[in-house]
Image: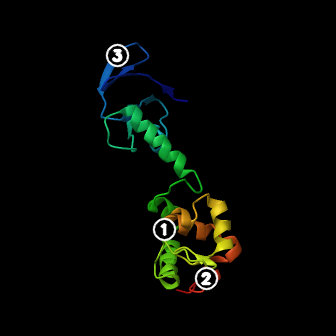
């Protein structure tokens, strides 16, 4: 087992208190967490350290990737919010990137081709008939996908990414893209 040294964070620097009580100071870059361990080391990918043959322990510095601001608390808050959204199946008010990450680029491109064939790519398509949205989805099928994702109806201003997510969420009842007239596009 490795023994973890105590860390005391002071503005802009880290004071390391060792076993003998000696204090050494290491300068820390903006928004970095320094992990120092003595002994067995660990996996540097998860916050551990590496140890060379002489027994010296290297530090693993991991920056807060959330944003480039100067406020560390804000950085951590944004990072945690991003992690929370990443773990949600269908996050509220999704960005294009979030939906692309969840369904994959192949499905995204397929949806764009189907929309171009069905409605000419008009994502505000809301006629009085049975088919709505940029993908020309049957109202009942759209309702199923809308309940699964929690996204808006086309009449409420559903965005392109929301409509594509709704279509993908409705796949269990539409058997994939075969439920669309232009499903082979």
Q: Which residue is mark 2?
A: 180
- State the SS at label 2: loop
Q: Earlier in the sequence, mark 1 or mark 2?
A: 1
Q: Position of residue 139 (x, y in %)?
A: 65, 73
Element type at mark 3: strand
Left/right of residue 111 with respect to residue 49 in the rendered view:
right
Residue 4, image x and y in percent?
Answer: 48, 26
Q: Position of residue 61 (x, y in %)?
A: 37, 38
- Dot 1: element: helix
The reply, left or right, for residue 59 in relation to residue 145 is: left
Query: Of the numbered discs in the image, which one, if any, rests on residue 23?
Result: 3
Depth check, mark 1 against mark 3: the one in front is 1
Q: Is residue 175 above or below residue 44?
A: below
| Numbered mark located on residue 111 in the image | none
Give the number of the disc on residue 160: 1
Query: What distance separates the C-alpha of mark 3 from that of mark 2?
Result: 69 Å
């Amino acid at each position: 087992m490795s023994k973890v040294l105590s860390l005391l964070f002071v503005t802009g620097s880290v004071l390391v208190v060792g076993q003998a009580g000696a204090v050494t100071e290491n300068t820390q870059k903006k928004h970095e967490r320094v992990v120092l361990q003595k002994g067995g080391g660990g996996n540097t990918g998860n916050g551990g350290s590496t140890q060379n043959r002489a027994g010296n322990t290297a530090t693993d510095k991991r920056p807060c990737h959330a944003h480039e601001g100067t406020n560390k608390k804000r950085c951590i808050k944004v990072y945690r919010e991003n992690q929370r959204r990443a773990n949600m199946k269908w996050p509220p008010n999704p960005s294009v990137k979030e939906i692309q990450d969840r369904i994959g680029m192949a499905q995204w491109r397929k949806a764009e081709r189907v929309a171009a064939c069905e409605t000419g790519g008009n994502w505000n398509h809301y006629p009085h008939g049975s088919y709505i949205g940029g993908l020309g989805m049957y109202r009942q099928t759209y309702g199923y996908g809308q309940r699964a994702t929690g996204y808006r109806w086309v009449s409420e201003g559903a965005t392109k990414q929301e409509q594509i997510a709704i279509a993908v969420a409705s796949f269990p009842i539409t058997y994939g893209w075969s439920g669309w007239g232009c499903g082979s596009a």
